[in-house]
């Protein structure tokens, strides 16, 4: 059993992830900003914690994380507002990493995106640039910490039925079901071979994909 804290606890992926973790015996704390979402989160079997991570400093996030065994960062501003995108996807994410180190919680899984690279190719004038820039900066910060970090880079998220399979060579913007992303997070937490890795993936095709557990062991 592990005690896992999930930031972005009311997001679609987190709502799929929590019951997976609970079903295998983990204790899950899901952090969300809106108190109206508490009942949705509690229905997953997770313990709901209301906290605005955009506003909390590192010390306060440290106290949220303390006592857990692993952190999952699945929070995001949702796009649209560049200032808030940087505040959540970059700055709050970085504070959570520093907080995890301060709380001596080494295991950290970052949910990023497939295109998060230094040469992501999104021009500065594009409305998507703040997200691309924020995610890359946060990913790089994680790589420079002493945490046992894993960066997951799913492609375009869909509401398709899960396949239980992923393709690590998925083409640019490779589509992937949110439920499969949740399954990859859950499997990564339990697989030491994912520590220190950046894993980019989509669902691929039946011919190009493989079971999630097998893919994460490569």
Image (cartoon, helix red, strand yellow):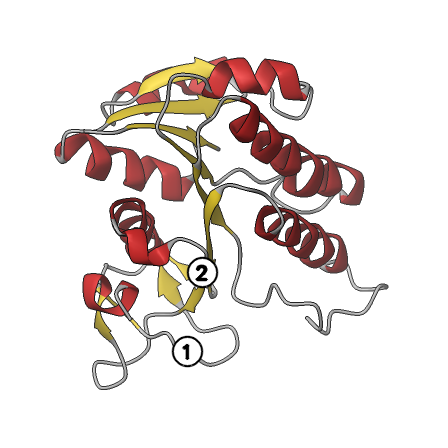
Res 214 visible:
yes
Instruction: Name the residue at 31% across, 58% down.
Output: 193
Instruction: Name the residue at 26% across, 77% down.
Output: 209
- Label 2, residues with CA under 10 Å away: few <14, some 14-19, many ≥20: some
Quick one: which residue is furthest to the left in this view? 24
Chain-order first, disc 1 or disc 2: 1
Q: For the residue labelled by badge 2, is the local secondary structure a helix, a strand or a loop?
A: loop
Q: For the residue labelled by badge 1, is the local secondary structure a helix, a strand or a loop?
A: loop
Residue assigned mark 2: 197
- Mark 1 near mark 2, Cβ–Cβ under 8 Å? no
Residue 128 versus residue 121 in the image, above or below: above
Name the one closer to the observer, 163 or 110.
110
From the viewer's perspective, tell me whether residue 213 is left or right of residue 58.
left
Q: In which quarter of the image is the C terminus?
A: bottom left
Instruction: Name the residue at 40% across, 80% down.
Output: 169
Label 1 and label 2: CA atoms lie apart by 17 Å
Give the number of the disc on residue 170: 1
């Amino acid at each position: 059993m592990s005690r896992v804290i999930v930031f972005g606890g009311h997001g679609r992926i987190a709502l799929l992830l929590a019951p997976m973790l609970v079903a295998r015996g983990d204790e899950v704390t899901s952090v969300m900003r809106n108190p109206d979402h508490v009942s949705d989160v509690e229905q997953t079997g997770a313990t709901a914690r209301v906290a605005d991570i955009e506003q909390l400093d590192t010390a306060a996030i440290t106290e949220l994380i303390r006592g857990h065994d692993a952190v999952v960062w699945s929070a995001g501003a949702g796009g649209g507002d560049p200032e808030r995108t940087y505040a959540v996807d970059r700055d709050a994410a970085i504070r959570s990493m520093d907080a995890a180190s301060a709380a001596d919680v080494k295991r950290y899984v970052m949910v990023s995106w497939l295109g998060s690279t230094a040469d992501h190719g999104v021009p500065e004038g594009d409305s998507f640039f703040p997200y691309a820039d924020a995610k890359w900066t946060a990913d790089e910060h994680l790589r420079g910490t002493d945490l046992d970090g894993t960066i997951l880079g799913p492609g375009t998220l869909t509401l398709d039925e899960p396949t239980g399979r992923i393709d690590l060579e998925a083409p640019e913007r490779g589509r992937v079901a949110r439920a499969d992303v949740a399954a990859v997070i859950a499997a990564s937490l339990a697989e030491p071979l994912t520590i220190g890795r950046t894993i980019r993936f989509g669902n691929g095709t039946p011919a190009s994909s493989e079971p999630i557990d097998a893919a994460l062991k490569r």
